[in-house]
Image (cartoon, helix red, strand yellow):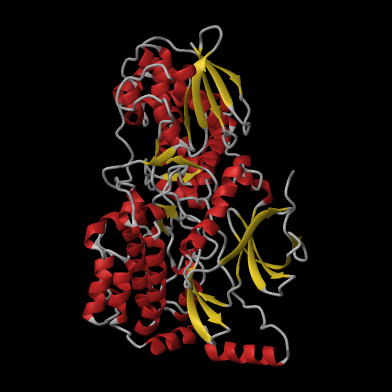
Amino acid sequence: MASRTPAPGAIVDNKYRLAERIGGGGMGHVFRAENVLAGRAVAIKFLHPELSENTELAQRFFQEAQAVNRIRHPNIVDVIDAGVGEMGPYIVMEHLEGEGVGSALQRLGRFDVDASVATCIPVLEALDAAHRVGIIHRDLKPENVFVAFDVSRGQAVVRLLDFGIAKVLDSSGPSPRTRTGVVFGTPDYLSPEQATGDAPIDGRSDLFAVGVLLYELLTGTRPFRAPTAVATAFRVVHAEAPTLAAAGVHVDPRLEAVVAKLLQKDPMKRYATAGEVARELERFSSDPMKRSMALGRIINLPRRVAQASVAQSQGAPPPPPATILPEPDRISTPLREPPPAPAPIRPSVRTSFSDPGAPSIPYAPTRVVPSMGSPNRTSDPGPPPRGDYIASSRNVEPLVPPAMPKPLGVARNTASSASSSSASVNSSSAGPPSRYVQPRAASRFPGMYQVRGAVLRAVDKALTEDAGPRVREQVVAQLPQRYAEDFLNDSINALVAYDLEALDAYMEIATAISLHEPSRWRALGRLAIGGELHNTVRSVLRPAPDLQIAIRRGISIWSRLFSFGAWKVGASQSGKVVLQIAEFEPASLALRLWVVGMVEETARRAASFDVRVAITAGEVGFTPELTCEIA
């Protein structure tokens, strides 16, 4: 049964009356509400109604409540209640009056030393408590730090928010937040190991983010700024961190040294614990009262105290704050820089990657984790139990690249490309450019699914080789600006996860301008194996004992290219190999046909004979599965 959409005035579980909507993001809505029995103001997060029936998304959604209640620290926003009602899964959190640090930075430009230290010490104490119970925040940024007005004490306090993508280090099962194998977080604040996935992350990854936060508080700018998210991640991994003095801010050299140590590329060279950093920072603002006053100035504490006093004298609750909570936890977003948010006072303009509404960004590529009885990845596998093998986007973990690669893609194997010339489509005559229409997948699944940059590069290069550079220029010219830039600059990184919408837009425009029929994408899928994808699938192309083993090998590679889909191989009653891709609803018809062509050409080369693939189900865009018979 579908959930009702939350709306002001609605009653949740006979306990909470919803007031106004105060936020929203990729997973749902945030409302201010009142507990009708206790009269307490609260904030409630809901899953979007269309997502509420998905049990795995609900599990992700409740992860924040579980993490917060496991830590139980006064500097972490309190989770009061959680449940599933008529409006779907919900989490009830304490109501905060005050201002997010991201908003305050935009308004003030930068913080002084006392305010910067006063902000970071409570954050570090909260992180220290989280790390002690094996939880890493993984998305520390100004928008997840809140300076709140504590009415009972009449002072400003700091709360750490949004443990929605936290990683539990000692979990006995797979973390629901890492099931797609991508690294979540906002690019400017990722640690190098988090950006590349080249090592397991621990609490020291959060300490790198604290270093970025402290640098930003003191200078008003981020240390690894770059025009695009990919370039930012590259700078995080490879560029030396600038000094505070280079940003025109001169502080105690010992504080400069603290920031430099936090921003070390090697986790072993950073501080060991968050508590150690908190003690270091206390040396630069040792008076707690002075720090409290610095926080109070950020949120204009005297005005808030006066408002609370008047409200209490009149027997009424204090007026609702202008800012209560940031957006709810997120899944993913396109790897791109949206238009900057206005910052009339701040010297550097902040983009919406660090705005309250910006979802977290997936970076690291994925690797299939074999399920029980699955074949070994490093040797020829034998037949799996019951004749089938499943590789699902639910069973993935971060791939370990040697380093962040240069954004030039993989080398092209021209010899192999020539051998696939029979797969080329004759599209030399391009039709007139057509008006771009947003793909239905993007409108149905905004920001929820990703494809590897290798797929974008392969589609782009195959079209260019087949139809010519002029057609390619026409396609790129009609792409939305946020996607066109990476194509124009040839800066698509093969290992990075990009929003599926970018691929959908490219394929739809190319179909209208040149191919005219989605069916022709199948030939371009075959062409990609001899070209841009050759290095990606090279390990699958060696001779296989039989066709089923060749397909099982292929699944270990193909399934890495998408954040969705559950791949399974078996045999039909007639003895043909059957490939089924379940949970494939986000895929358009053009993408499905391109995948079939890719599978066909990979299997042909591995089996060393002419392989034919027949689509038996799912030759329609946005359907739950795709099934093929291979012989």
How many numbered markers are drawn?
Answer: 0
Q: Residue at x 55, y 62 (%)?
A: 357
Q: Residue at x 36, y 60 (%)?
A: 226
Residue 303 seen:
yes
- Examine the image and state in which quarter residue 452 appears: top left
**Relative image position of residue 352 (x, y in whole percent):** 50, 63
Camera-side residue: 372 or 178?
372
**Relative image position of residue 322 (x, y in whole percent):** 61, 76
Q: Is residue 538 left or right of residue 136?
A: left
Q: Is residue 284 left or right of residue 294?
A: left
Q: Residue at x 63, y 88 (%)?
A: 308
**Relative image position of residue 505 (x, y in whole percent):** 55, 41
Q: Is residue 96 above or below residue 327?
A: below
- Examine the image and state in which quarter residue 172 appears: top left
Camera-side residue: 175 or 132?
132
Residue 431 seen:
no
Q: Is residue 158 above or below residue 300?
A: above
Quadrant in the picture for the N terminus: top right
Q: Residue at x 55, y 68 (%)?
A: 78
Q: Residue furthest top?
A: 574
**Relative image position of residue 175 (x, y in whole percent):** 46, 46
Q: Is residue 487 above or below residue 625?
A: below
Camera-side residue: 231 or 357?
357
